[in-house]
Amino acid sequence: MKRVLTYLCMAVFCLMAATTVHAQKVKTHKVKKHETIYGIAHSYGISESDLRQANPGMESAGYVLKVGKKINIPIVDDSSKSTAKPGDDVRQRTIRMGVMLPLHNNNGEGRRMVEYYRGLLMACDSMRSEGISVDIYAWNTPPDSDLSGVLSTSAAARCDIIFGPLYSKQMEQLSAFCSQHGIMLVIPFSITAPQLETNPNIFQIWQNPEELNEITSRRFTDWFKGYHTVIVDCSDPDSKKGAFTAVLRKDLEKRKSKYSITSMASPDNSFASAFSTQNPNVVVLNTARTSDIDAIFARLKRVYELKPSVKISVFGYTEWLEHAATKSNAFHKYDVYIPTPHYYGLSPAQSRIMEQKYRSNFNSSMYAYSPPLAFTGFDHALFFLRGLHKYGSSFDGAEGRFGYKPIQAPLKFQKTGKNGGRKNKAYIFVHFKPNGMIDTINY
């Protein structure tokens, strides 16, 4: 993106020079088994750069800590050690955004992250008209990289917000760093982050499958109250959707809601007998296998023939959205609801405009990922940077903080525990209505 790269982005794809430390005095520490330079520095509340500079030879390549060795621990004057950001109030100045992801063209993982990063850039560019200016610092952090060099830079310490990492093994270092410097850390993708339970600076966007099953089941029983649920066994030994139908059955039983179980292999009359003619029915499969999408519609056609008065809706899975274009007519005919944390069609007009801008800015089209990662990055940056601009460091990402129309990824955060960070709880049903319209129901 020519304008963004020219006016906004200060990309840092190499390690920057370490900052200078001004120590008043030192104390000693005896190295214990399994201790690391980073871990020792963190335990004393200093940077790894500070520790290395206080110990001659430690900055040399290949330096190894020796158990039992006494090393210097610098005691830094608070005024010289402070990482307070000039201007203090981020609402009154340029926001400093860091990106720590694998940004390369070596494989699909890197290319996906580059596309996500480009979405972040496009969001920053679009917010200039709102008076929101952003300086961007980006580091390429592949899985084998050590974050120590990156985190020793003055640019990293001055960030207000960092998007990353992509790898669970980088979380401990990055979480401790953000906690030390008061930096908001946004985890965009599916990694293990136990630090979320103890670090209030963390915002985790990804929702794990177990949580999604529970959320989906609760929303299902709310929305389809008064319906008769029909659970269809599709004999798919590789399916992971049985975990959802198991949770759903428990919730239905708690609410004393009626449901029946049938099989895709059952004869027509037996299959149709599972459907109520007194209440509307909602069908749930225990698989997201593509071949079963057409198969269930064929079975439902026969149910309509055997029971003309029956009313049926179908509850699908997020994976079904990949086939929405080719199966649109069937989705509408059978009143399909699809639960998802993201939907490409939330803002169709804006999506088309952004696709055009992406091609123009980067001379390429987006990759055929689901969901499109440039859109994901755009939504994430818009949400958090507008939040910082309006609320400063007190922004909590809760619902209703400001008017926000995402392209595909709604966000709504709730606090995790007393001292923990925040998890994204945004969730929608995409409803393909029989009249040809598509509604999105937000929760």
Image (cartoon, helix red, strand yellow):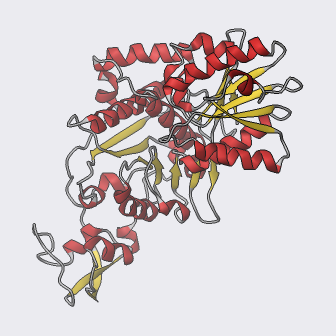
Name the residue: 11% across, 75% down: 57
Residue 282: in sight, yes or no? yes
Q: Quadrant of the N terminus?
A: top left
| Residue 354: % across, % down | 45, 18
Vertical relation: 16 (above or below) 411: below
| Residue 256: % across, % down | 85, 46
- Relative to 233, is 161 on the left or the right? left
Name the residue: 59% across, 47% down: 243
| Residue 130: % across, % down | 53, 27
Count of all numbered marks drawn on residues in the image: 0
| Residue 99: % across, % down | 36, 44
Name the residue: 82% across, 25% down: 280
- Relative to 391, is 276 on the left or the right? right
Name the residue: 30% across, 29% down: 5
Question: Hey, which residue is sitting farthest right in the picture?
Answer: 278
Vertical relation: 383 (above or below) 396: above
- Relative to 76, is 285 on the left or the right? right
**Which one is nearer the viewer's eye here, 43 or 334?**
334
Residue 89: in sight, yes or no? no
**Which one is nearer the viewer's eye here, 231 or 2?**
231
Q: Quadrant of the C terminus?
A: top right
- Relative to 226, is 73 on the left or the right? left
